[in-house]
């Protein structure tokens, strides 16, 4: 035989203001369809901890308990991509995924036919020995990046390419919890013999949620194409944040600039962000297909971020 005592409230308070439930009493909330409401407060309002105490930290938006030594937080993993080991693991995973990001029929698989800093014709006199890539930080930039290079650092920003094979991709990350203006640029002879369509830019994403990441900013430059013979030349730039990382983006498109011609010119992209990563890819729409649309670019970004989401869980 069992018995129960049901009360609406337990109101007896100790001198400290805590509810007193004497004896070895367990609380079973399995029949409730709402939730337990825990004590909550800022980090500065933490009490002198006793082993097993639990509370919700409103400063960090995380559950925490006292383990006898310190307050230990439970919740989404903090942003740790700036750690070289974590960044290296991300690079390694994405290297194995990169040939899966182009939607069928949307991105022409150009050849890599020169040194690891640029591509030459890459089929049908496409790039004219150009498209050098640089990391940019606060308006300054590195020398031309080799796509077979390992981890590098410039003005505290870490960056690494994914290898000299299609598609040519680089990923960069700034120090944790530091608001930083950084991005990428390309220079050199970028066009397809100056023929065909004129360079233009496309806003791909503007603070959107993509594959669980938010905010996401992406910008595409169609540099040039020849409708009759040469595939398009397309520069994709992207800033990626995540709410669980406490990401912020003060300027999604802090710098977006490109020359209006196809030969011996440039494109620049920078954003201002905290706890994000910024990446770039050199793409092509394909022969006789003209410039790349927003939908084409979104297909690549979506697939890239789906792989990133799998890595980060």
Image (cartoon, helix red, strand yellow):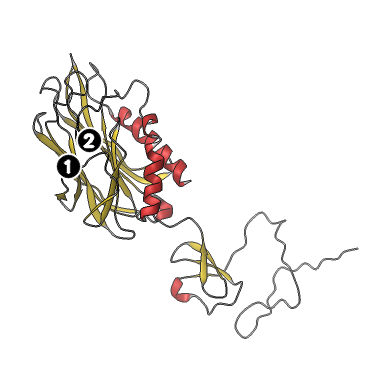
Q: Is residue 21 left or right of residue 62?
A: right
Which residue lies most toward the bottom here? Answer: 15
Quadrant containing the N terminus in the rendered view: bottom right
Please state which of residues 221 and 311 is positioned toward the viewer in this rendering.
311
Image quarter of residue 123: top left
Asked whether the viewer can see residue 81, the reply is: no
The residue labelled by disc 2 is 116
Q: Earlier in the sequence, mark 1 or mark 2?
A: 2
Q: Secondary structure at mark 2?
A: loop
Which residue lies most toward the top here? Answer: 228
Residue at position x 71%, y 76% from top? 21
Note whether 21 is above or below 100 in the view shown. Answer: below
Residue at position x 26%, y 20% from top? 286
Of the numbered discs in the image, which one, if any, rests on residue 257? none
The answer for how far apart the CA atoms under marks 1 and 2 are is: 10 Å
Asked whether the viewer can see residue 42, the reply is: yes
The residue labelled by disc 1 is 144
Please state which of residues 107 and 96 is positioned toward the viewer in this rendering.
96
Q: Residues within 10 Å of mark 2 (few under 14, many from 20)?
A: some
Note whether 96 is above or below 138 in the view shown. Answer: above
Residue at position x 14%, y 19% from top? 196
């Amino acid at each position: 035989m069992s018995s129960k005592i049901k009360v609406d409230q337990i109101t007896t308070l100790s001198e400290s203001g805590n509810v007193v439930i004497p004896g070895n009493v367990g609380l079973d909330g399995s029949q409730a369809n709402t939730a337990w409401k825990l004590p909550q407060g800022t980090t500065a309002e933490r009490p002198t901890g006793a082993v097993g105490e639990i509370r919700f930290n409103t400063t960090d938006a995380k559950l925490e308990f006292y383990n006898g030594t310190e307050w230990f937080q439970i919740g989404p993993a903090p942003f740790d991509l700036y750690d070289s080991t974590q960044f290296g693991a991300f690079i390694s995973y994405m290297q194995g995924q990169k040939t899966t990001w182009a939607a069928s029929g949307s991105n022409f698989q150009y050849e890599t036919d020169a040194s690891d800093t640029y591509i030459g014709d890459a089929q049908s006199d496409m790039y004219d020995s150009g498209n050098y890539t640089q990391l940019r930080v606060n308006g300054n930039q590195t020398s031309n990046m080799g796509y077979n290079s390992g981890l590098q650092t410039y003005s505290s920003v870490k960056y690494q390419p994914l290898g000299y094979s299609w598609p040519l991709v680089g990923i960069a990350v700034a120090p944790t919890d530091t608001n930083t203006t950084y991005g990428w640029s390309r220079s050199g002879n970028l066009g397809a013999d100056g023929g065909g369509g004129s360079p233009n830019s496309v806003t791909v994403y503007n603070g959107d949620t993509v594959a669980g990441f938010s905010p996401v900013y992406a910008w595409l430059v169609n540099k040039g194409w020849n409708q009759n013979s040469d595939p398009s030349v397309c520069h994709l730039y992207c800033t990626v944040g995540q709410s669980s990382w406490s990401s912020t983006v003060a300027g999604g498109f802090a710098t977006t600039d490109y020359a209006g011609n196809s030969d011996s010119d440039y494109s620049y992209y920078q954003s201002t962000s905290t706890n994000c990563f910024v990446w770039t890819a050199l793409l092509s729409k394909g022969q006789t297909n003209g410039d790349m649309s927003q939908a084409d670019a979104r297909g690549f970004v979506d697939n890239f971020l789906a792989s990133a989401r799998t890595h980060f869980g």
